[in-house]
Amino acid sequence: MTSKKNHQLHSMTGFGKADINLTGFKANWEIRTLNSRNIDINIKLDNQLRPFELTLRKIIQEGLLRGKVDVSLALEPIGSKIENASVEEAFDKRLETMMAMLGKHLGRKGDLSTDMAWQLLLKEDLWNASEEGIVWQDKDVVLLQKSLEEAIAQTMEFRRAEGEQIHAFLDQELGCIEGAIPEVEQQLTQRSQLLREGLERHMQEIKDLDANRFEQEFLYYLDKWDVTEELVRLSAHCAYFRTTMDGGKITGKKLQFITQEIGREINTLGSKASFAPIQHLVVNMKENLEKIKEQLANVL
């Protein structure tokens, strides 16, 4: 059985980035996500943006929903000056001094590159007119948030593409389980015939063969080993899994719950089978289900 194409499974593995030019410098967002039971956000920001961290975290949480999320913001100067900062001859001398100090601190001989110096200065907020780091303007913060949303959208598109591959895999493994159900039903007919023959041989060893006793024994074992209800429920659970998977919603946890129900029916089927060919089919179904569970651990 094949699934319809309008599904929206998303992986929790993702990557996204976005760049924005602000007042005198360029901001670069980068997002990496992995699977996690809940939302776990690690965000690296310029110190001057700490007052806005809760707002940024809320944007990230609402956009990415679940997973281990690493977010970093890199700042680069545009050209050789930054507005709102005192960039004069005194600053050139100060930059030269700072480079020498940083080079000494890092065990270098004053050969620290300009690009590296800029990164260190920006990262540590060691410069501006007020000696307090970059002065963020309100319009810059708004643009920065929009840029973050772009990076999140790119990450979700990455997740969606990964989800396409996971969906194809789940569809295949679920199809194997569904395909085994009619095979089990075929084996049940053979099992019933072998059961009857075995009971007949056993009863023939008894001198006084009681036909009623034979039928009672036969019906007892048929009822004890009957798996009709398990097969019906297993088929229903598989159909529900497929409907949920193709439902176009964020359903990773729900799919995990459905696999638990599928597993219960497969286990019961195995314990009641008492027939090697059926037990072999059960082993294969368990293998398929385990593969499904492994993939669902990374589904949003």
Image (cartoon, rainbow, N blue to C red):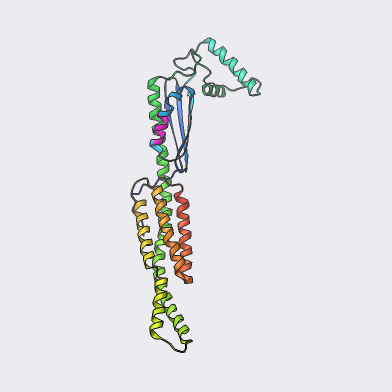
By secondary structure, the bulk of the magenta-drawn segment is best described as helix
Q: Nearer the viewer, residue 36 or 141?
A: 36
**In the figure, 32 relative to 293: above or below?**
above
Bounds of the magenta span? 55-61
Q: Is residue 153 visible?
A: no
Q: Residue at x 41, y 61 (%)?
A: 265
Which x, y percent locates residue 141? 40, 24
Q: Nearer the viewer, residue 110 or 283?
A: 283
59 in the magenta segment: yes
**In the figure, 170 relative to 40: above or below?**
below
Which x, y percent locates residue 96? 58, 15
Q: Residue at x 44, y 78 (%)?
A: 195
19 in the magenta segment: no
Horizontal side of 150 relative to 126 (left or right) equals left
Number of numbered callouts drawn: 0
Please state, as top left, top right, bottom left or bottom right, where the C terminus lies in the image: top left
> Which picture quadrant has residue 218?
bottom left
Which x, y percent locates residue 183? 41, 68
Which x, y percent locates residue 153? 39, 37
> Which picture quadrant has residue 200?
bottom left
Q: Nearer the viewer, residue 201 or 143?
A: 201
**In the figure, 39 relative to 3: above or below?**
above
